[in-house]
Amino acid sequence: MTNKRYTLDQAKAAFEQARKEFYGTKRGLETEFANFVYHCKHPLNGYPKLDFVKTVPLLLPAIRNQIANRSRMMSKNEFVPPPKNFKTWINNRCWEESMPDSQPAKLEHKCCVCGKVGFKGFWVVSNERFCSKECRLKKLGW
Ligand SMILES: [Zn+2]
């Protein structure tokens, strides 16, 4: 973190860098930047107002961290939620989300049919997880 305050142009350039690297659906720079500035001033859900110039530097590190976490979860065959679109990510201040460095064991997937844990490769239906095709068919009553 730097103590030097960005000019508006620098803030916008830093925002653009974050927007480019964001992993979900996004709109153009002007649209997303205007939304970001607006939401810092008019937050959802009674969140505190933010100084958008001071907030901009937080976006890119959070995005990179989330991308790294998502790819780690994917490589472990863990459930990875679909990416939010950038507007939703901004409006919900998802740069403030902290993700664990590693998944605690209690989050291990559990088959909803046989109760097996720690399996690789599974089927997900709504929020139910199945360790195998057999368990999934069992749940369906086949
Ligand atoms: Zn099972």
Image: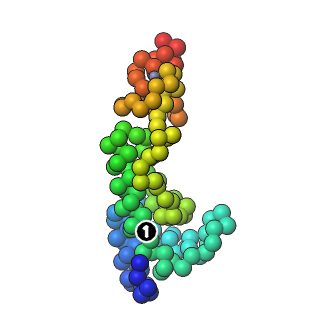
Label 1: few (<14), some (14–19) or many (≥20) C-alpha neighbours in 10 Å: many
Q: Quadrant location of residue 28?
A: bottom left
Q: Residue at x 49, y 59 (%)?
A: 98
State the quadrant of the N terminus. Answer: bottom left
Q: Is residue 94 placed above or below 110 in the rendered structure?
A: below
Give coordinates of residue 81: x percent, y percent. 45, 46
Assign a secondary structure to mark 1. Answer: helix
Q: Pick whichever, 46 or 99, lies toward us.
A: 99
Q: Pick whichever, 105 or 10, lies toward us.
A: 105
Give coordinates of residue 116: x percent, y percent. 46, 25
Q: Which residue is mark 1?
A: 59
Q: Residue at x 50, y 71 (%)?
A: 36
Check the image and name the residue furthest to the left.
75
Q: Is residue 46 left or right of residue 119?
A: right
- Label 1 CB-ligand 1 distance < 8 A: no
Give coordinates of residue 122: x percent, y percent. 40, 30
Q: Which amino acid type is shown beneath numbered disc 1?
A: Leu
Q: Residue at x 40, y 73 (%)?
A: 15
